[in-house]
Amino acid sequence: MSEKIIEVKGLKKSFGENEVLKDINFSVNHGDVTCIIGSSGSGKSTMLRCINLLEEPTGGEIIYKGKNILETKKIAAYRSKVEMVFQSFNLFENMTVLKNCMVGQRKVL
């Protein structure tokens, strides 16, 4: 059985009265390849932004390697282990795509 890397339990996110994420639950095991699909405006990017703590969830838990990251104050350490590629990405023109993907980790680590 594989180790759970990220487990999301009851994730919720609201913007004012608009509840965008409602009770999202899933887990990603070591070695998994996971795809998130859905129609435009269904909350895919908001969910990813919550997982990476670029948005503060309204409720729920985000468990990374057994620890609820919403309860810890070690956000920078968590972000150094979890990466995200945006839909509208802006690459540095003086670098290859591979170097663009590595620059964040190289700067942090």
Image (spheres, helix red, strand yellow):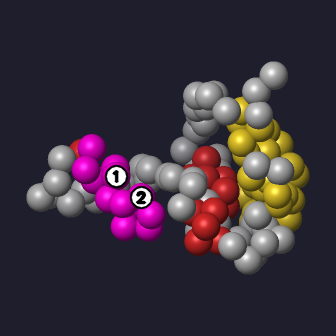
From the image, which quarter does the N terminus lie in? top right
| Amino acid type, residue under disc 1 in the picture | Met
Residue at 87% x, 52% y: name it.
10
Residue 102 bears which disc, if any?
1
Q: From mark 1 to mark 2, how far is it between C-alphas? A: 6 Å
Q: Where residue 92 sits: x, y (%)? A: 21, 60
| Amino acid type, residue under disc 2 in the picture | Gln
Asked if residue 7 is positioned above or below residue 16 in the image, the reply reads above
Asked if residue 4 is positioned above or below residue 32 in the image, the reply reads below
Magenta residues (range): 98-109
Residue 106 in the magenta stretch? The answer is yes
The residue at which mark 2 appears reads as 105
Occupied quadrant, residue 70: bottom right
Q: Where residue 11 sits: x, y (%)? A: 81, 55
* In-image side of 43 versus 66 (left or right): left
- SS type, badge 1: helix
Task: For the residues labelled 1 and 2, say whether their Cβ atoms are less than 8 Å apart.
Answer: yes
Residue 52 in the magenta stretch? The answer is no
